[in-house]
Image: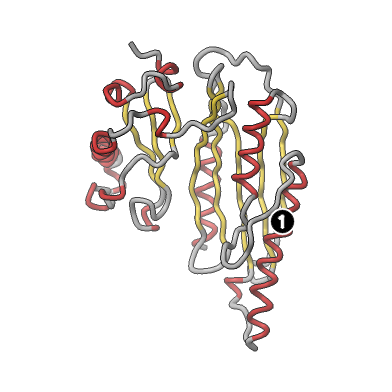
Amino acid sequence: MKRNLIFLVAGLMALALTSCRNEGKETTVEIAWDTLSYNHLIADQYEAGISYDINIVLPKEGLNEAYTAIRHQLLTHLFAMPMSYGECDSIKLDLNDAQACLKAYLDANQKCLDDILASFKEDGLEAPPYDIHWECNNTLKPVMVNDTLITFLLNYANYAGGAHGIHGAVYMTFDTQTGEQLHDKDIFLKGTDEQLNHLLQNSLMHYCEKFEEQALTTADFEIDMLHINDNFYLTPDSIYYTYNVYEIAPYAYGSHTFGFSAKEALPYLNKESLAYKYWNLK
């Protein structure tokens, strides 16, 4: 029941962000998209196996060098490691073939599960039912496109044994001219961490005030862990950060997204950054 609730929450998050925002000037590249899907349900949650619900939207191969680089980075992020880290090796991927990447990921996951089942058998034990039925739910799609930036959102809700699954959201923003991912260090001036942390603390306070029905206060969060984390998305006047489970609060508190305005961050911005230009700051 707990796991089903996790996946329901993740599904609602995905539905809430289905539309791709074209902010700023229209992109100068006519983007064509590839859709990569794999859906496999094992109805009996006590049956050994892996249920999948994977739905991914990628730039098509060959648009230009920048979009090819973006596509390869997304495939690497999605498929380079199996669900269960343990002793499983990283996965060798053919980044020119998305279907082959998906197959390598599925095969690696199955091998991890088979190895776990074999280890129980070697010890003369039966694997607990709640550890032998895994679930992988990943949705990736573009949520903002303009002439200089493109942002993708990965929603995930995965279970690979243990007390509960892991769910969250990851935003990745890329320079559409070079294909390079945009990081915090590209947006903000070096040595401004303390000031940015203060902005985040103020933002968290307002966030808690806004959602009083959740009965959250800043005391529920680990303030010393609150810092820019590269998991951000841009709007025409602000930057928002997502903190997934365990990052700044216990698992039961879930994920949280809050941020600050470009004007608040103005003294700490790198004026050569794409974010500064995107915000058209003076």
In the rendered image, residue 16, in percent from the top left (x then y), is placed at 51, 36
Mark 1 residue element: helix
Front residue (pair 65, 215): 65
Residue type highlighted by circle 1 = Leu
14 sits to left or right of 265: right
- Identify the residue position indicated by label 1 in the image: 106
Q: How is the image coloured?
A: secondary structure
Q: Residue at x 66, y 40 (%)?
A: 56
In the rendered image, residue 186, in percent from the top left (x then y), is placed at 42, 29
Above or below, 72 relative to 274: below
In the rendered image, residue 120, in percent from the top left (x then y), is placed at 63, 81
Q: Residue at x 74, y 27 (%)?
A: 62
Identify the residue at the far front of this view. Answer: 190
Q: Residue at x 72, y 29 (%)?
A: 60
Quadrant of the drawing holding the C terminus = top left
Task: Rate crowding at label 1 as few (under 14), some (14 to 19) or many (20 or more) other CA atoms within 10 Å.
Answer: some
